[in-house]
Amino acid sequence: MSIILDIRNLTIALETPSGLTKVLDGFNLQLEEGEIHTLVGESGSGKTLLAKAILGFIQPKWRITADRLWWRQQDLLAMDTAQRRLITGQDMAMIFQNPASYLDPYLRIGRQLSEVIARHPHRWRGAQRRRQHRQLIVELLQRVGIDDIDAVCNSYPLQLSDGVAQKISVAMALAHRPKLLVADEPASAMGQYTRSQIYEQLFRLNTEYGMTMLMITQDLTTMMQQTQRLSLIYSGQLMEVGPLKQVLTEPAHPYTDAMLKMSFLDSTHPPKTKLPTLPGSIPTSQSLPIGCRLGPRCPKAQRICVQRPELTTVQQRQFACHFPLIEISPHE
Ligand code: SF4
């Protein structure tokens, strides 16, 4: 498979009361075309910041540097705003945790869907182009599992449940068939049934269209069924990345181990709450530890951990830890 998104040594520094702070600190991520890649980390780890950087939703005050931030061999950091918007509009879409932040509260859903479709007329070719927007809206809504189409189209966002509103945002993301879909905690605030429905719809997009997906979540249990590779982020640093099965059966990093134990303890662990399998809580951007940022919470930490560990590669996975949980043979 080819690498569609290639991020190396990405750092995003923000102005904080205590000065410039690296909220994302030398992060690496490679997405293979057509894969579902899950990014796991506690709230405050920089997951949403990373997602926004990928889609180019960048604030002027952010200082972004990277050895590489490439989308299909094109350097995103070298592009001007117009080029970047074009790439994002054509190739990428994002689903947010809170659909209310994405939908216009003053416009009926039908109108909003119509406007999204109109922005991407080139995507609908041949027979599809001749169809009316109405037909396209019906198709999209049926695809995300909405049957009561007239009622939903005539509603304002606040009249819909969170689950239905999130399905609308999935339909909008689908309208221009992006090559990359970034889903940021797409169902974390929903009940189990709705959550399963949302994920099912997303997984179908991957199967039917080969859409590459970056799923940002703490809901590791649901993702275990579908994801091919897993990345773990803590306080802006990459802890471990690798094929799902390898990471699950033999975690190399203490943080991975803690996240897995938490998932087995409680699959519905809500976001923005403490991780029960590690003492303490994630540091704020004003009080970041030096070296490995997990240090103050890590059961294996030693003095050397104030020096940031290099990424170690073992077969298909990488991890950053001075004292990994797996044996590394000298030739690896
Ligand atoms: S480098 Fe040290 S502090 Fe960081 S995870 Fe490994 S053992 Fe823990």
Image (cartoon, helix red, strand yellow):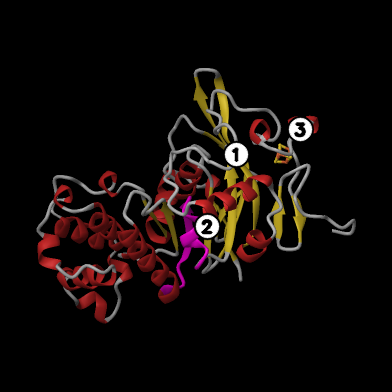
Judged left or right of residue 187, residue 259 is right
Which residue lies under the disc numbered 2? 38
Residue at 33% from the left image edge and 65% from the top image edge: 197
Residue 209 or residue 185, whichever sits in front: 185
Percent x, y of residue 291:
71, 32
Which residue lies under the disc numbered 3? 307
Residue at 54% from the left image edge and 49% from the top image edge: 262
Amino acid at pointer 2: Thr
Amino acid at pointer 1: Leu
Name of the residue lying farthest toward the top: 18
Percent x, y of residue 55:
44, 49
Which residue lies under the disc numbered 1? 278
Q: Which residues are magenta?
A: 209-225
Secondary structure of residue under mark 1: loop
Amino acid at pointer 3: Gln
Image quarter where ligand 1 lies: top right
Q: Is residue 104 visible?
A: yes
Image height of 243 relative to 13, above or below: below
Judged by depth in the image, the label closer to the viewer, 1 or 2, is 1
